[in-house]
Image: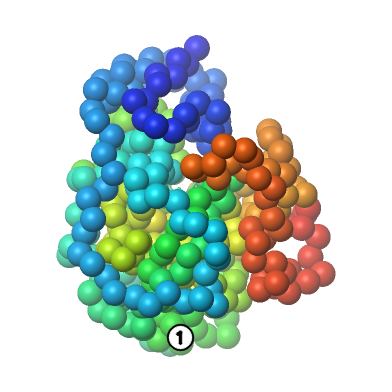
Amino acid sequence: MVIRIRQSHELPSSEITPHALYLRRRAFMAGAAATAAGVVAGCGARTEAALKPAEKGAPLAAARSAAYSVSDPPTSWESITTYNNFYEFGTDKADPALNSHTLRTRPWSVEVGGLCQKPRRFDIDELVKLAPLEERVYALRCVEGWSMVIPWIGYPLAALLQRVEPTGAAKYVEFQTLVDPEQMPAQRKSWFGYSLDWPYIEGLRLDEAMHPLTLLTVGLYGHVLPNPNGAPIRIVVPWKYGFKSAKSLVRIRLVADEPKTSWNKAAPNEYGFYSNVNPNVDHPRWSQATERRIGEFRRRKTLMFNGYADQVASLYAGMDLRKYY
Ligand SMILES: Nc1nc2c(c(=O)[nH]1)N[C@H]1C(S)=C(S)[C@@H](COP(=O)(O)O)O[C@H]1N2
Ligand SMILES: [Mo]
């Protein structure tokens, strides 16, 4: 039996760790009982540490884009930086805030390559200046059934992809997160005995990647991106479940075939490649009709494509969204 230790944390996380529970159960069934017991011990030790919101890093100036912002009030900095999914630092919501101080975000570079005319490596400080920064207040809907409203800073991924000139053979884009167990403790083999395969891989169809809503993201709330949110650079795809928005990217590749993405590999019947937010297609283990907006009391209805249907529905014209979930 796996016992959950309550975190000393303002948000009750008990009902909303289905990603983690799945992996935990899978590891358990594979005979990793000893490791599972270790998890409990580890959690107990960590509850001693106080959970603090991320310190604000360097300010990052960006004008708010009205056209690409929702009007809902943004979730607090504290919640956005202490209630995270970032499995490289552990599977509990508080783990990224407690453990991500070991991530070094300078020097940092991102290799952009694959099927393109001008593949190259970009230094992070060059990437931040590659296109005008905008603030965009986006809704984020996690597949687990909670949501936030987050004022990101970045620019469309399209601006970067155009620089490298994708060839006609490029049909998809693959995103890779850093692998470094020294910096990302949950990548150590000894950590839990269950987790995802590293690197964390996500992907989009090329037209999705080129859509103006798809944001290459380097900041949050007027400051550089804090570590728990995927510093120094991540992708944000607001009409898809949050796990599509891969953090701490080191590699972006243009490819011909649909990338083999981490969550899809872990549980293909639960997490499809597309993973568009869709209240009409339930997860095999729970309904997707409603969500809990962090900071609100009552659940609210989940909107088709997370409220971005006007802008993105045409990308999926003629596709059976039950098949391509
Ligand atoms: N590399 C990496 N990226 C990731 C994840 C992760 O575990 N590792 N979790 C995803 C999930 S499930 C969600 S909901 C969002 C959460 O983003 P946030 O913590 O900035 O709100 O990040 C996504 N990106
Ligand atoms: Mo998520």
What residue appears at the point 57 percent right and 81 percent down from the top-left corner? Answer: 169
The residue indicated by pointer 1 is: 162
Near-viewer residue (134 or 202)? 134
Query: Of residues 297 and 53, which is closer to you in this image?
Result: 297
- Left or right of residue 156, residue 39 in this image: left
At which x and y percent is residue 237? 53, 63
**Which quadrant of the structure image shows residue 5?**
top left
Amino acid type assigned to the residue bearing label 1 in the image: Gln
Residue 99 shows in this picture: no
What percent of the width, then of the height, locates residue 118? 38, 86
For mark 1, does the 10 Å Cα neighbourhood hold few (<14), some (14 to 19), or many (20 or more) residues? few
Q: Residue at x 31, y 69 (%)?
A: 110
Rendered image coloring scheme: rainbow
Q: Secondary structure at mark 1?
A: helix
| Residue 5 to residue 154: above or below | above
Residue 289 locus on image (x, y percent): 72, 44
Between 202 and 153, the one lying in front of the other is: 153
Q: Please name the residue shown 32% across and 82% down the image.
A: 130
Q: Position of residue 280 (x, y in %)?
A: 77, 49
